[in-house]
Amino acid sequence: MQKEKQGDLLDSIDYSTIVETNEDAKDGQNKCPKCGSTDISLNIHSGRLRCNFCRFELEPQPLDDFAEDFNHLRGKKISSGAKNIKKDDHQVITLKCSSCGSEVVIDTTSQVQARCHWCRSILSINHQVPNGIVPDAVLPFQVSKEEAKKQIEKFVGKRRFFANPQFKKEFTTQNIMGVYFPYMVVDMNSHANFSGQGEKLIRQYTRGNERNRQTYYDADLYHLEREFDLKIQGLTLESSKDRLNKNAVDKTNNVINAIMPFDTEKCVKWDANYLRGYTSEKRDINIEQLESIVEEQSKDIARFSANTTLEEYTRGVCWSKEEFSIQGQRWKSAYLPVWLYSYQQIKGKQKILHYVAVNARTKETMGSIPIHMSKLLFCSFFIEILGILAMFFVDFDYSWLFLFVGFFYYFFMYMKYRNRNARHQYEIETKTNVEHVRKVDQFLQRKTGLTNSKMIGANNTCLHGENLKKGILDILE
Ligand SMILES: [Zn+2]
Ligand SMILES: [Zn+2]
């Protein structure tokens, strides 16, 4: 066993332990314990698997989670379903039907179930084929197709005026799809140590005459230190390359990212029957590729967690030293449920796949709607003209602002329809627990007559964005 010492995290994650989540799984028939039928699927209302023959409901199997307590999580634990993908593993598996003895072929590149063509029994892949198709856990669909349709119609309904006419004509929620997307879910025990300076606003006032008025600020400058233990629960990452590429120009993947978070603590143990009636996408990314992203996101989470102890520093905090160490981490792979509407817009040679996605647990909805550009440009132009007129006729100190009103309108509408900036705010939406906080708040000096409204160099509400981008680009290459 390695010595547990706060701070020497990076050394301690060199070794990893595989935790079996699927030890005694055998492929073949998943039978109803009451009547023996293999016709079993999810009852969305109860969240349980139900026998479609005798209506018996099976008790969900909790994920054989690491038995040890979160507090004692040390080193790196990997659930067996999150192990590295073997590219050339035999993907076509032949199963013997236990009812009639015939052989049934399942191509595990795309399927985890098949029906025996002789006796109609359903055969399932239960063991973790090392090609990424069988995860440790599944989060069952909870939002019905009808509810998802309503959500999507509501979302689109609010964005009709500037919607592309072709889209308006073709829009229907008839063929929305329930998709299980692959994710990695990470729990982490970490330690953060920050030091720097922060400013509290004392007063704000204006000087000068009518024509030349200037706002000034007085602030108290403090030396600050914050050190704490941080537990991060259920940090969730896309684990298919296609989905991870949130800046893709041909697909609006960012809107699928934006419907996170999921209640991943409700995940249940893998059973192929949860996928019946839904489609799924296979994982094609390994843990080592996601590690740098997880570390960057965790640092962001640590920074934002510190902010809960910094509320009086309204002008901001500038951290000059930030130490972050991971004492323990555990990884599992999971399928999470999404209702997806997609629409392909063809603009000359360019094709854009627009999505409207609904989180099938929380109903959170986000989407991208193709825009009728000439209409939006015309309206923005018209508003711009009104703005210019207003600039001449309205008596207002900042009347030059009217000069931009058309541009603002265009930008606002574009964002409302396309949501290009929508994303999951993992830094504040991930579940965390901050403990054993050590605080230093040492008054340094009062500064008067400052002209900037925020502290210069404040970084406590910024993300470590650049490294994160690089981590994603490395995977996509
Ligand atoms: Zn039954
Ligand atoms: Zn059979």
Image (cartoon, rainbow, N blue to C red):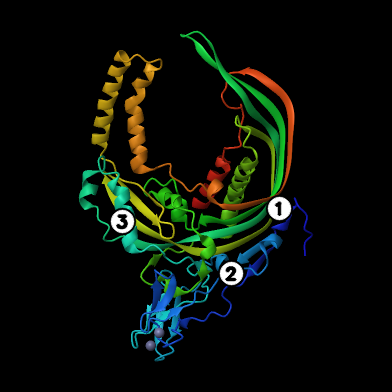
Q: Residue 383, located in which quarter of the rendered image?
A: top left
- Name the side, left or right, on which 438 lies relative to 284: right
| Ligand 1 under 8 Å from disc 1 Cβ | no
**Residue 43 in which image quadrant:** bottom left
| Labels 3, 1: front one | 3
What is the spatial separation of the Cα atoms under label 2 and label 3, in whole angstroms? 38 Å
The amino acid type found where label 3 is placed reads: Lys
- Closer to the chain start, of discs 3 and 1, is 1
Q: Which of these two is toward me, 287 or 30?
A: 30
**In this view, the mark in front (2 or 3):** 3
Residue type at tag 2 = Ser
The correct choice, above or below, for 39 with respect to 150 in the image is below
Image position of 4 (left or right of 324) = right
Q: CA distance from mark 3 to mark 1?
A: 47 Å
Q: Name the amino acid type tagged 1.
A: Leu
The residue depicted at 41 percent of the width and 60 percent of the height is: 360
Q: For residue 307, say whether it is visible.
A: yes
Q: Secondary structure at mark 3?
A: helix
Point out residue 377 in the picture as x, y percentages from the top left corner.
Answer: 27, 32
**What residue is pinned by disc 1?**
10
Q: Which residue is mark 3?
A: 150
Residue 117 place in picture, x, y as percent? 33, 84
Image coordinates for residue 269, horizontal then vertical, percent? 52, 71
Q: Which mark is residue 80?
A: 2
Quadrant of the rendered structure where residue 391 is?
A: top left
